[in-house]
Image (spheres, helix red, strand yellow):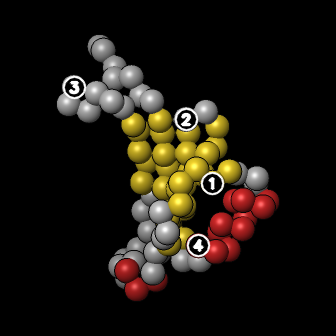
Amino acid sequence: MDYLPLTQQITFLYTHDLITSTLFYEEKLGLKLWLDQGSCRIYSVCGDAYLGLCQIELASVSASQKQPNVIFTLVTQQVDE
């Protein structure tokens, strides 16, 4: 089986308090900001692996969800294949 060449990986986590989360990941863990999208900040973890922290409003989480979902992204230039 041929596998697509993956070039990056991004895991997105949701937070109700982006400012506090930002301080933890930047100041306590020392992660470097790679891309600031306003309500979502993406940090370089190592190589081409990234962590995204995204602001989510408590009202947008359904009553059945205690925590919002995680988005795990694998990046390749050969999407059509």
**Real-space Cα separation, disc 3 to disc 1, in angstroms:** 31 Å
Residue pictured at 45% horizontal, 57% vertical: 70
Which of the labelled discs sits on residue 18, or is there none? Answer: 4
**Contact (Cβ within 8 Å) of mark 4 with mark 3:** no
> Is residue 67 at all visible to an observer of this figure?
no
Q: Earlier in the sequence, mark 4 or mark 2?
A: 4
Q: Quadrant of the N terminus?
A: top left
Residue 28 is situated, as x and y percent measured from the top left of the image, at 79, 59
Label 4 element class: helix
Label 2 element class: loop
Nearer to me, 79 or 34:
34
- As drawn, the residue found furthest toward the top would be 1
Q: Is residue 17 left or right of residue 29?
A: left
**Real-space Cα separation, disc 4 to disc 3, in angstroms:** 36 Å
User: Which residue type does callout 1 highlight?
Assistant: Leu
Count of labels shown?
4
- As drawn, the residue found furthest toward the right would be 28
Which of discs 1 and 4 lies nearer the camera? The answer is 1
Q: Which residue is mark 1?
A: 33
User: Which residue type does callout 2 highlight?
Assistant: Asp
Which of the labelled discs sits on residue 81, or is there none? Answer: 3
Label 3 element class: loop
**Real-space Cα separation, disc 1 to disc 2, in angstroms:** 13 Å
Q: Earlier in the sequence, mark 1 or mark 4?
A: 4
